[in-house]
Amino acid sequence: MTEPEEDFAAMFEASLKAKRFERGETIEGTIVAIGADVAFVNVGGKGEAIIALDELKNEDGALEVAAGDRIQAMVVSTEGGLTLSRTLARSAASARQLEDAFHAGLPVEGKVERAVKGGYEVRIARQRAFCPASQIDIARNTAPADHEGHVYTFRIIEYKEGGKNLVVSRRALQEEERQAQAAEIRRSIVPGAVVSGRVASVVDFGAFVDLGAGVQGLLHVSEMGWSRVSHASEVVTPGQEITVKVLRVDEQPERIALGLKQLMADPWSTVQGRYEVGQVRPGRITRLAEFGAFVELEPGIEALAHASTFAPTGHAGGWTRTVSVGMTGGFEILSLDLEKKRFGVALVLEGASGADEAAVPSPDEELGDDKARADAESSQGFGSLADKLRGALEPRRK
């Protein structure tokens, strides 16, 4: 067979292949090429069909498929070749096509006519369908008026009495789209990636951030800033749009750890040359531990004042009675370890403020204070006599 004869045979076989399909029939094929307005689909043998690109895009207008992907669609025309559709237009759908769409799971267009008891009345072509209220939207807090008059894409979930009894769901398609979007988002979320999201909720230990399509990550309170954050609400609020960095992704269980401070300048990077042993710097006590007090010297720079550096009180843990969280004062730098980001400091009492309010004396201390006051009052009362006695004895000692 010569080359022209081979071309003719291929064209003849393709034409026969096309004639085997009927309008309303659901077929499966592989996308072989994507043009400016249509995609070309191999439907078996050398048969080829076309489908409008708009049918292959999501709600945001982005193409959902690529060459090599397999799709399922319905034949809407056999004239001049095969034309496919993945969505039946409500004006063009026949009873037979609706039945095919039900068996194939093909989406169909419908108009929400009105709200009825338990759901909505939907018109698909000349057919009346019922959409339960729980199936109209993936969101739970919508009002009936939000949907009336709108044209949506539905999936037929029940087909009875030859199409006279149709039950449809919009939510089923929304969930499928959301799952596809979530899978795409998860592929882009890798450690080190910088992503945008919306704060979904704020809890004591951090905030959950919606990265899209229901995919959430945790922004722990310790990753919100270089300074110590007491509660996540100090930094973020529900609904706030933020940019975060992906720190870790655990597949089992599925967890995404996010960071905010990693997108800010690290204050420790500028410490070199500004701090030296022996310096006295102002600081604020941020928290107390059994072994000492943590002191913030500047936002993000925290030091430790060990318990042994505080004045002894005569009993274990008594040093905590002389200081409190929030107390400010001067702190002398005792040690520096920039590599480990550690400072050792000691409180300089002369520069402290707030210590009087923070100090809680022990019973023994209170008794000692009362005795001291009594002695002082006695000394003041007999001061002149004591002075005369000292004066009289002074010459004898000499």
Image (tube, grey):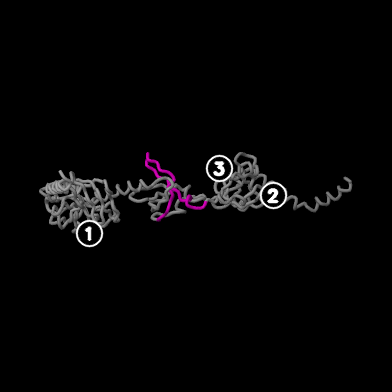
Q: Residues within 10 Å of mark 1 (few under 14, many from 20)?
A: few
Label 2 and label 3: CA atoms lie apart by 34 Å
Q: Residues within 10 Å of mark 3 (few under 14, many from 20)?
A: few
In the picture, the disc for residue 373 is 2
Label 3 and label 1: CA atoms lie apart by 62 Å
Name the amino acid, label 3: Ala
Q: Look at mark 3 in the image and give the residue it sits on.
A: 289
Give the structural element (helix, strand or loop) at label 2. helix
Q: Look at mark 1 in the image and give the residue it sits on.
A: 150
Could you say where residue 197 lies in the image, as x and y percent from the top left? 39, 52
Give the structural element (helix, strand or loop) at label 3. strand
The answer to whether any part of residue 300 appears in the image is yes
Part of the protein shown in magenta? 240-265
Label 1 and label 2: CA atoms lie apart by 86 Å
Q: Residues within 10 Å of mark 2 (few under 14, many from 20)?
A: few
Foreground mark, 1 or 2, reads 1
Question: Outermost residue, left direction?
Answer: 162
Name the amino acid, label 2: Arg
Could you say where residue 193 lies in the image, as x and y percent from the top left? 42, 48
**Is mark 3 in CB contact (under 8 Å) with mark 1?**
no
Could you say where residue 126 lies in the image, as x and y percent from the top left? 12, 56
Residue 245 within the segment the image draws in magenta: yes
The answer to whether any part of residue 26 appears in the image is no
**Of pointers 1 and 2, the one earlier in the residue sequence:** 1
Camera-side residue: 270 or 110?
270
Left or right of 109: which side holds 330?
Answer: right
Could you say where residue 21 lies in the image, as x and y percent from the top left? 13, 48
